[in-house]
Amino acid sequence: MVKRFEDLTFTDDFMFCKVMQNPKLCKKLIEMILYDTIGNIAYVSVQHNINTYEQAKSVRFDVLVQAENGKFYDVEMQVSNERNIPKRMRFYQAALDISFLDKGNSYNALNDSFIIFICTFDAMGKHKPVYTFENLCIEDKNTPLQDGTKKIIINAEAFGGTQDEELKDFLEYIKTGKAKSEFTRRIEEMIQTIKNNEQARQEYRLMSTFEMDARDKGFSEGTYNTKRETARLMKMEKLDISLIKKITGLSESEIEKL
C-alpha cells in the first residue's frame, strides 16, 4: 500500500528528498553527521539517476550534493534492512567515480566523496550510533590509503549512545518522530510547507502511480511504455522537463518527442 501524502514523514523517500532540496537543511545535516564543515553547496540533486551502460544495474541516489570545493556527498535514507548496505555502498561509490571522471582525465582528478546511509536500524549489529569507514593498511593501521573516500552508516536505534546532543536529538527524531531540537523542528516546518504545496502533492501521486505500475510489470517493455505514458501526462500538466526526467528516467529528447 502507498502511504497517503498527508501521512508522509521525514524517513519516507519522497519527503526526505524534498526536505533535502533545501540547501541550508541539507548542509546542516551533512555537517552534523561528519562533525565537520563542508563549505558552500554548489548543487543538490535528488533522485539522481546514473546509468553506466545498458546491461549494468543502474543507481538512483536519494540526495547527491556537491560542495564548491568539488567534494561529493551521497545521502541515503534507509528504513528496511535488506542486509546489503556494505555492498551497496561499494557499488554507489564505484558508480559515482565512473560517472564524474571524464575520459582522458587523471585518476588524481577524482573528487573526494562521502557515502552516507541514515538507517532506522543497526546495519552493523554493534549498537553504535555512527559507523565510519576508511581504507587503511592492514599491516599498519596508521597508514590510510588516502583514496579520498569515506563511508558512514547512521544507526537511529542507538540514539541514546551518542554524547553529541544535537546528533542524539536528530537520531531520536528519525526513530520516534519527536522533534525536540531547533534543527528537527525546522525539518518538521519544512515538511508542513511541502504538504501544503499542491505541486508536491501532484508529483507524489504521479510518482506513486508510476512506481506501482513498474513493480507490477517488472523491468520490461511494459515498464518503458508506462514511463512514456507517465511523461506524456506530466507534459499535459505542464510540469518541468527536469521533474519528468527525474520521475520517469527518460531522456530529454524522448520526452520532447511525446
Image (cartoon, rainbow, N blue to C red):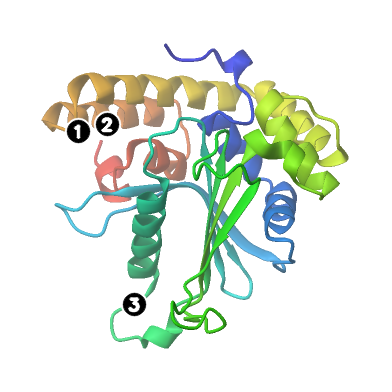
Q: Mark 3, mark 1: which one is toward the viewer?
A: 3
Asked if 103 appears above or below 72 in the picture, the reply is below
Question: Looking at this view, is 86 or 139 the one in front?
Answer: 139
Q: Is residue 122 left or right of residue 235?
A: right
Q: Which residue is mark 1?
A: 224
Which mark, by number, is residue 102? 3
Quarter of the picture containing the C terminus is top left
SS label for mark 1: helix
Where residue 149 appears, as percent x and y from the top left, is 49, 70
Q: Mark 2, mark 3: which one is toward the viewer?
A: 3
Where residue 9 appears, as percent x and y from the top left, is 63, 24
Looking at the image, tell me whether mark 3 or mark 1 is earlier in sequence order: 3
Q: Is residue 105 left or right of residue 218?
A: right
Badge 2: residue crowd in 10 Å (few <14, some 14–19, many ≥20): many
Mark pair 1, 2: CA separation:
5 Å
Mark pair 2, 3: CA separation:
29 Å
Which mark, by number, is residue 227? 2
In which quarter of the view is residue 159 placed? Answer: top right
SS label for mark 3: loop
* Residue at 33% across, 32% down: 231
